Amino acid sequence: MRRRRTASAARTPRSLVGGAAADAFTVAYDGRPVAALAGQSLAAALWSAGILTWRTTRVTGAPRGVFCGMGSCYDCLITVNGRPNQRACLTPARPGDTVTTQEGTGRADLTV
């Protein structure tokens, strides 16, 4: 006879694969620290910190964040380490990244 599982004995994805939480690190977003985990996109790290918008549109300055979440729409553009127009949903968070709100088309220091 099979024993019925109770809610307290429910399986989770982590328990099925034996995974463990990765060590957290920080990225800087507009000068404030944001926690991130290995393998997490910048969009996921920002969302986890309660930050839902990180870009303004060119013409009206309307706020934008993640829309499609898979790199098709370009609504989540962000400036990472001085490079504008990076898609936050596809850009992996890396320790020490400096992320800033992108205003309009973004601006890069083009001096070489």
Image (cartoon, grey):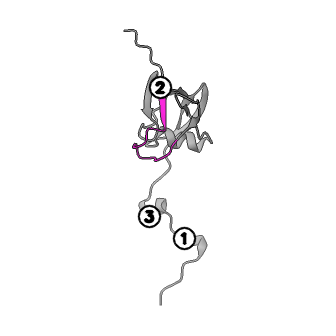
Instruction: Please give the label number shown on residue 16.
Output: 3
| Stretch in magenta | 66-80
Callout 3: SS: helix
Residue 54 x/y as whole percent: 56, 34
Look at 61% across and 39% down and name the residue there. 51
> Comparing marks 3 and 2, which lies closer to the viewer?
2
> What residue does disc 2 label?
105
Between 31 and 2, the residue placed more toward the observer is 31
Between marks 3 and 2, how big is the CA–CA gap?
44 Å
The answer to which of 95 and 90 lies nearer the viewer is 90
Which quarter of the figure has residue 111? top left
For image coordinates 51% across by 68% down, the residue present is 11
Judged from this view, the residue extending furthest toward the top is 112
Compared with residue 88, is residue 84 higher up or lower down, i.e. above or below? above
Question: Is-magenta flag for residue 78?
Answer: yes
Q: Amino acid at mark 2?
A: Thr
Whole-angstrom CA distance, mark 1 to mark 2, is: 47 Å
Q: Which residue, given by chain and number where applicable, does mark 1 sit on?
A: 10
Mark closer to the chain start, 3 or 2: 3
* Residue in front for this viewpoint, 105 or 33: 105
Looking at the image, is mark 1 or mark 2 earlier in the sequence? 1
Residue at the spot 60% in from the left edge and 73% down from the top edge:
7
Determine the secondary structure under disc 1. Answer: loop
